[in-house]
Amino acid sequence: MTTTTPSLLSVRDLTMTFPGRRARSAPVRAVDGVSFDVAAGETLGLVGESGCGKSTTGRMIVRLLEPTAGSVSYDGRDISHLSQRQLKPLRRDLQMVFQDPHSSLNPRQTVARIISDPLLVQGSSAAEARKRAVELMELVGLIPEHIDRHPHEFSGGQAQRIGIARALATGPRLVVADEPVSALDVSVQAQIVNLMERLQRELGLAYLFIAHDLSVVKRVCDRVAVMYLGRIVEIGVKERVYAAPAHPYTRALLSAVPLPDPAAERARSGSRCSATRRAPPLPAGLHLPSALPQGAGDLPHRGAAAADRRPGRGPAGGLPLPRGTGR
Ligand SMILES: Nc1ncnc2c1ncn2[C@@H]1O[C@H](COP(=O)(O)OP(=O)(O)O)[C@@H](O)[C@H]1O
Ligand SMILES: [Mg+2]
């Protein structure tokens, strides 16, 4: 991306400090001075191990969370502290796909209702919204006749297609996809990635594609940002980051990318346990580069708080979240 191309999304020094979960526990800095841009139609991969702050970053971008510091600018406008009412028109443009499709869909609602809801909120009539829901089902490869079924009648991959259709209903320009295939069977993951690639081409979408695994984003992203303990430790074009990772943590994450050759895979270190699911920690003795803003100050390491994570917990601050959004 050149400096002459205005960014669709521009994130600067984005920071989120959560209050301690218990009365006297210290606050937790989940995201610590994160900056990056996403151009229209581009895919930026955001990768790092569980608990490093990826979902919190995504939620601040779509303003399900309000940042404690720093800014999120969309199309040149700072949206970091807009009120819910001011955000309403922007909700058309900024959408999110969640990790666990089943827990992010209301089991009591029909597909028609789930996909139409964002349109009804934006003022479409019920008839218009239903017609659009049928079109969206076709677009994402679902059978429109199933429109009055409930989420439990669909497989995981189909449920994620419903989640994608819901995200596309209002015609967004930027979709934050928070580990959209992590909860799916490996055989289904490629189908959903293919679908997202096709939709991007057809609709000109920009994606922030979040994953804990570099192998997942390798195909889809143009650039990749590597996150570690709330900070971006490396960002660059995909070809460069994969071929010549500059940061030791990126190299550690890359060593967890499964090798295509099973013999070579077996020959690798036996100590690597389920490394494709969970990235290894930063090698012993390594620290974040001093060039990066430190600023963690007196805040504790988030590792302690990570043990507390509960699926489906809403964010601090009481902002609305789709039901039981998985992390
Ligand atoms: N609502 C919250 N309240 C307190 N701590 C939170 C909350 N949401 C996330 N955290 C903490 O912030 C850190 C980053 O979480 P998250 O953004 O979900 O990471 P990731 O998506 O990379 O797994 C974790 O330590 C997590 O426990
Ligand atoms: Mg997450």
Image (spheres, rainbow, N blue to C red):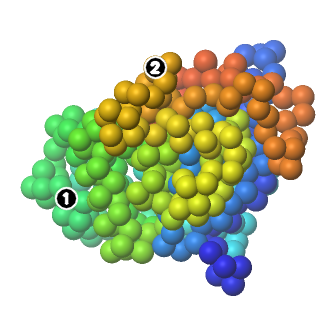
**Residue 134 rendering spot, x and y as whole percentages:** 19, 63
- Mark 2 surroundings: few (<14), some (14-19) or many (≥20) residues within 10 A: few
Q: Amino acid type of disc 2?
A: Gly
106 in relation to 243, above or below? above
- Of marks 1 and 2, the one in the foreground: 2
Residue at figure coordinates x 41%, y 28% from the top left? 267
Residue that badge 2 annotates: 270
Residue 141 badge: 1
Residue 29 in sight in this render: yes
The quadrant in which residue 53 appears is top right
Residue at figure coordinates x 61%, y 54% from the top left? 244
- Mark 1 surroundings: few (<14), some (14-19) or many (≥20) residues within 10 A: few
Q: Tell me: 118 left or right of 237.
A: left
Specify the farthest residue to the left: 145
184 in relation to 120, above or below? above
First-in-chain label (1 vs 2): 1
- Locate the N terminus and report the quarter of the image it occupies: bottom right
Residue at figure coordinates x 56%, y 45% from the top left? 47
**Residue 48 rendering spot, x and y as whole percentages:** 58, 40
* Label 1 within 8 A of ligand 2 by Cβ: no
Residue 316 in sight in this render: no
